[in-house]
Amino acid sequence: MSVPDVNRIRSSFFFVFCALFLTGCGTHHPTAMFLEPEAGSSLATVRLITNGVVHGGEYDGCVADLALMLRAGRVKEGRYNPAHMPAPYPPATLGLPGRKAPRLLDIWPGHRLAQGYFAEAIAEYSVPAARPFMIKGSDIHAYAPGFSSGYVCRGEARIYRFEAGRSYEIVVGMAAQPTQDGPAKPVCLFSAYELGENGPDVIESPHPLSFSTPEGIRCNSTRR
């Protein structure tokens, strides 16, 4: 699906999201922002895109508290609502190659509509290369008008190993996908791929980066 297709579809969607959307819907994370590794380390560069919340950090066999890497902000009358700013702001940029991901949906919450909608956020970081690095997205709960069951993108964690000197794009969030005989449907994205001249279609990527999943064992005080 091309980016223009997604842009046309997104105007027809009006999703009502849970009030806990930007706090991870019940999960508890530290508010500390991600700190890039020191210069001179073996590094890769990553562009993150989300209309939710993404945490990240190195993984050494157990699940520690992850730093906040990206959080969507709320837009009102063409500008960010000061009470719901994206993080980081201003966004971190490294001048990476052109974006390949489709634009994600604007998210209208189920209450306090006057405060605006949640818009996708983008940030670029240097991250450790050749070592396991975890990316975790929080739950997204969506409710389309007329459907009581709603739609859920479950929070998920994946572990990648990036190659030194290479650039990547990772998109975590909700977009829209057309159907042959009905309205477009919401689709959950968690896609990672190397940036290059001809990037893949993110929703149906034929060459995603390989990943593993964490074991779920919490780190104790001696390992953190």
Image (cartoon, grey):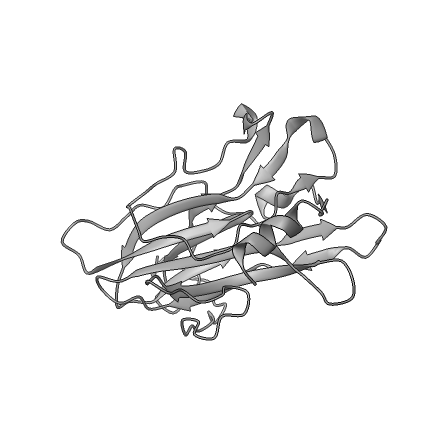
> Is 34 above or below relative to 130?
above
Q: Is 110 placed above or below 6 here?
A: above
Image coordinates of residue 109 in percent, x first then y, are 69, 39
Q: Where is 84 relative to 195, above or below?
A: above
Q: Which residue corresponds to the image point at 58% horizontal and 42% vertical from the top-left?
A: 22
Quarter holding the N terminus is bottom right
Image point (57%, 34%), residue name: 74
Q: Quadrant of residue 62?
A: bottom left
Residue 69 point in image, percent of width and height: 41, 47
Q: Quadrant of the C terminus?
A: bottom left
Residue 113 relative to residue 146: left or right: left
Q: How many marks?
A: 0
Q: Nearer the viewer, residue 138 or 197?
A: 197
Residue at the (52%, 62%) spot, across then down: 190
Q: Position of residue 52 (x, y in %)?
A: 55, 47
Picture coordinates of residue 101, whole percent (x, y): 47, 56
**Which residue is nearer to you in this view: 57 or 18?**
18
Residue found farthest to the left: 40
Taking the image as drawn, is residue 25 in sight?
A: no
On the rendered structure, is 122 left or right of 22?
A: left
Task: Identify the residue at horizontal 55%, vertical 31% (top origin).
Answer: 84
Observer able to see residue 135: yes
